[in-house]
Amino acid sequence: MDWRNPMLYRTLFEPEHDMFRDAFRKFVETEITPHHAAWEADQHISREAWLKAGEQGFLCPTMPEEYGGAGVDRRFSLIILEELCGANASGPGFALHSDIVAPYIRNYGTPEQKQSWLPKMATGEVIGAIAMTEPGTGSDLQGIKTRAVVDGDELVLDGEKIFITNGFMADLVIVAAQVVDPATGGEPKLSLVLVEASRDGFTKEKPLNKLGQKAQDTCILNFSGVRVPKSNLLGGENAIGGGLMMLFGELAWERLMIAIGSVAGAKFCYEQALAYTRERRAFGRSLAEFQDVRFKLADMKVKISAGQAMVDQCMTNLALDKLRPEDAAGAKLWCSEMAFEVADTALQMHGGYGYMQEYPITRAFADIRVNRIYGGANEIMKELISRKL
């Protein structure tokens, strides 16, 4: 798919965005796609890929130059997402690292925390993850049970996190935990704690065996008596209790990112279906000559165009600081549902071949399913939207 000749004419980009897209597309073609099958077998990408991405400026591009980034706008982040999803390359967790984890540190961290971590995240020397979800707690952030008890100048962390993207390879994890200070009565206060992977008592289980996105490392993290200095509290020692505000402050962008990836993934599935139905013949003609197939392709194209328009409008609103949480939730909801419908239709058009793992549409179908779950399940998105009616 040529994103500059899309289903709808897009006014979102400037020439510098097109140049960046060309460069990143070449990077994906040479450094990502050839290795993706091997990474799927390993259940994580290579550290070399992270370092190469950092070397070429594809990690943390929106970070200020003083912290190793390029100081560019979020349209560059959108391009990275579109190109990865448009190439059916779900393995690299660059987006979470660059556009979720790093912004938490940039927006809420102390000067020392920013200087310690952001430059190394921009080079790929440090891989970042964020740990919110627990075995019994998903979208209900206030139900988090992981605890960090104040002990003098340290925090003692105990708990378990599950489904953590980048977790297996992460060097730094932002952990959502209930901080308890016995000196002030012991009331649990949700906070974010920076935890280095080298800390004693911090263990990672092997990557989880998922339905899709098999090259994207996702694992369980365990914290057993992990000691970190109080200065590892994101925002500093006085930031106890600020976790919920920080988490809610970044969720809208996270959900918009899922919408962006959903539209790009749907376009990939559409392109696969279009190419296959033009080539595959039945009863003396190509599948694409059958009215039922043509109408389904037309329906897919229109729905993808609608999703693209929604994403681009949300990006415009984001740039104006006008993106409302319910609008981001709506984009995530509609685009992820649309993408799964498109993927399912595209797979059906492949017939029996669509059920074979060696076909790209099969992997894309499995990869795209989780978009309706992570970032807040779509049922939760409907709840959030309905509260604002």
Image (cartoon, rainbow, N blue to C red):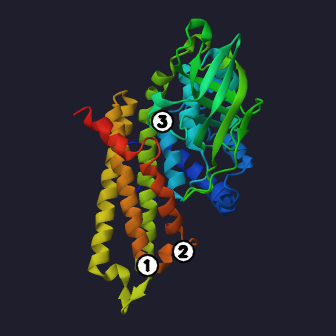
Q: Which quarter of the figure has residue 356?
A: bottom right
| Sequence order check, earlier mark of 3 and 2 | 3
- Whether 241 is drawn above or below 95: the answer is above
Gap between marks 3 and 2 measured at Cα: 37 Å
Mark 1 lies on residue: 351
Gap between marks 3 and 1 measured at Cα: 39 Å
Q: Quadrant of the C terminus?
A: top left
Q: Position of residue 179 (x, y in %)?
A: 58, 19
Mark 2 lies on residue: 356
Q: Is disc 3 surrounded by few (<14), some (14 to 19) or many (20+) residues within 10 Å?
A: some
Q: Position of residue 85 (x, y in %)?
A: 51, 54
Determine the residue positioned at 69% across, 21% down: 156
- Whether 238 is drawn above or below 169: the answer is above
**Outermost residue, bottom direction?**
284
Q: Nearer the viewer, mark 3 or mark 1?
A: 1
Determine the residue positioned at 41% across, 34% down: 252
Q: Position of residue 282 (x, y in %)?
A: 39, 88
Tag shown at residue 269 = none
Q: Which quarter of the figure has residue 114?
A: top right
| Sequence order check, earlier mark of 2 and 1 | 1
Secondary-structure class at tag 1 = helix
Gap between marks 2 and 1 measured at Cα: 10 Å
Q: Position of residue 117 (x, y in %)?
A: 68, 27
Secondary-structure class at tag 2 = loop
Q: Is residue 311 visible from the viewing direction of this image?
A: no
**Outermost residue, top direction?**
183
Mark 3 lies on residue: 74
Q: Is disc 2 surrounded by few (<14), some (14 to 19) or many (20+) residues within 10 Å?
A: few
Report the amino acid beneath label 3. Arg
Report the amino acid beneath label 2. Met
